[in-house]
Image: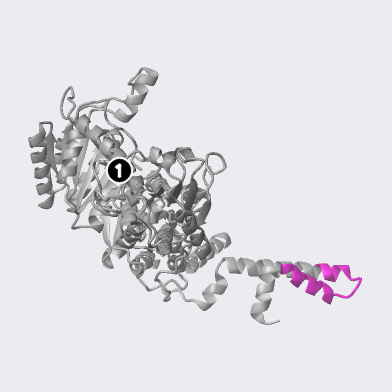
Amino acid sequence: MKGTEFLWSQRHFPWRVMETLTAAAPAGSFFPSFLLLACGTLVAALLGCAHRLGLFYQLMHKVDKASIQHGGENVAAVLRAHGVRFLFTLVGGHISPILVACEKLGIRVVDTRHEVTAVFAADAVARLTGTVGVAAVTAGPGLTNTVTAVKNAQIAQSPVLLLGGAASTLLQNRGALQAIDQMALFRPLCKFCASVRRVRDIVPTLRAAMVAAQSGTPGPVFVELPVDVLYPYFIVQKEMVPAKPPKGLVARMVTWYLENHLANLFAGAWEPRPEGPLPLDIPQASPQQVQRCVEILSRAKRPLVVLGSQALLPPTPADRLRTAVETLGIPCFLGGMARGLLGRNHPLHIRQNRSAALKKADVVLLAGIVCDFRLSYGRVLSRSSKIIIVNRNRKEMLMNSDMFWKPQEAVQGDVGSFVVTLAEGLKGQTWASDWAEELRQADRQKEQTFREKALMPVGQHLNPVRVLQLVEEILPDNTILVVDGGDFVGTAAHLVQPRGPLRWLDPGAFGTLGVGAGFALGAKLCRPDAEVWCLFGDGAFGYSLIEFDTFVRHKIPVIALVGNDAGWTQISREQVPCLGSNVACGLAYTDYHKAAMGLGAQGLLLSREKDQVVEVLRDAQQQCRDGHPVVVNILIGRTDFRDGSIAV
């Protein structure tokens, strides 16, 4: 047996070594057999221990004790090789090497005032660019502060990489500062979780994390980077190994262990390794599945398409998807990141009365949307309709299909690619124009209802429906809309239209408050030529106000419109009639514009009539174009005629 094969056998199959030694002993000689067995077991244990201590690896790979390189440089190199342009963070000593190295390599480091904002900003970058958004935060409470944003990214299926600092590898589970079981916390939230234990593992671990974030159903990933794999050798040595030579036997053994651990940390650390992207694994529908869907739709009289966020995922560009939807010629509803795909006032885009339309349709294509609460768990679908559903995630695709609905065809695959192929198969197919006209008529009726609501008087301040109508009228075509709130935003979802694809950012199905500042930050950095308008409820704005300090420091001009009705109105409008109390629902007509001015931003108050509303909004727009972040505090009356629905 060759040397390497012998070591492999001892390491993985020690009983084979024992069998060999036992067979070599004379028959009937128990003691020599036992002795050989014991020796074989001891040798196997020693070799296994040597492997775990990294002694074999260190024989082949050197430790450069004079190098001033550090693990943060390896992290930055992988991020740059993957095209990462921004790193969002809140600084901490555990992660300082990452931040310094990224800055040196030209990756813009943007520090926020709360870790959750950093992850929301990374989420926005992921959605708008189709790449991985990256945030780095320090250990312990720095990481726990991100949990809401990571969960939001998981449910919204955004590919976000979270880099987390950690206590040194030797001090974990020993009561070190900010040391908790971070892996247990993030495993339920992330597609991929890994803790790097040696400097040489940084590059391959990050490459694996990047590909996991984007493959299959996209989602967040987490990589834990203990402090001793990030700092240079001489700093780690100073902290880990005693300066004075040990005297006693036990002290010498401990020192040897520490020195060996240090050597194993840095062995082969700076050897060249591939840093670039690995191939993605994106599921695709089979030609047979597409053909069956073509046949189902070709026989439809009243077909309907509902497009969700997954339709806008790479590799299909938004303009190619739009062409495919127009080629299909089927009336469609757009939700999530698909909002704005067809621009404003497209004849195929139906905006109102989705539930009623779904009941009337004879074939429904659910493309990248699932039967959760947004579709009443599937109950809005007619039992007589043929349902085609396509989704990258099989479990989500079949959600509630055992209770309220049944798919005629369930296709696991990339949504955008499927729609493009489907359109090619149905090219030349037409449907009766009266079906689309019937749906558009319902839109016109709902819009008329809103026009009537806009003219209704309110007890004090401004009519929120009228304000949002004026906002819709003055928004330029390059606007990116960020929405964060309940009642005010729910109304805006009906009145304010995205100007194009990937120009609407809402939290998604998790319904998270507090996304506004982070989403706006990521959006403006990705699209510096766009105007970023944030529509806040006054309750939700409480989460984002301090980040106007971030906007000022980093010279990021955005416009925030705060619908200030001095309350958590979406909750209040149900709580009061149901339970007879407004407890915890009341806020104040706070001077949010003055608070923003205290942080260095521009602040404007809006509480006047129509012409002055437009004047103030135009003023905010000009201030933003001059490079200033702006908060417009809009005092609105408490009404009972707003829609108050949740944006989808």
The stretch of residues the image draws in magenta is: 14-34
Image x and y of residue 166, in percent: 43, 54
Q: Residue drawn 23% across and 54% down?
A: 524
Looking at the image, residue 254 lies above or below residue 436: below
Question: Which residue, as the protein is rendered here, is positioned at the far top?
Answer: 580
State the residue position of label 1: 440
Whether 25 is among the magenta residues is: yes
- Horizontal relation, residue 341 to residue 196: left or right: left
Question: Which residue, as the protein is rendered here, is positioned at the far bottom?
Answer: 2
Is there any visible trace of residue 181 in the rendered image? no
Looking at the image, residue 61 lies above or below residue 94: below
Looking at the image, residue 442 lies above or below residue 306: above
Image x and y of residue 109, in percent: 27, 58
Looking at the image, residue 626 lies above or below residue 473: below
Viewer-proximal residue, 486 or 295?
A: 295
- Horizontal relation, residue 17 to residue 109: left or right: right
Viewer-proximal residue, 96 or 391?
A: 391
Question: Which residue, as the protein is rendered here, is positioned at the far right?
Answer: 28
Image x and y of residue 360, in percent: 42, 41
Q: Secondary structure at mark 1?
A: helix
Q: Residue drawn 59% across and 69% down?
A: 51
Amino acid tagged 1 = Arg
Q: Quadrant of the N terminus?
A: bottom right
Q: Quadrant of residue 276?
A: bottom left
Q: Quadrant of the C terminus?
A: top left
- Mark 1: few, some, or many residues within 10 Å (few <14, many ≥20)? many
Viewer-proximal residue, 318 or 480?
A: 318
Whether 455 is among the magenta residues is: no
Q: Main secondary structure of the magenta part?
A: helix
Viewer-proximal residue, 274 or 558?
A: 558
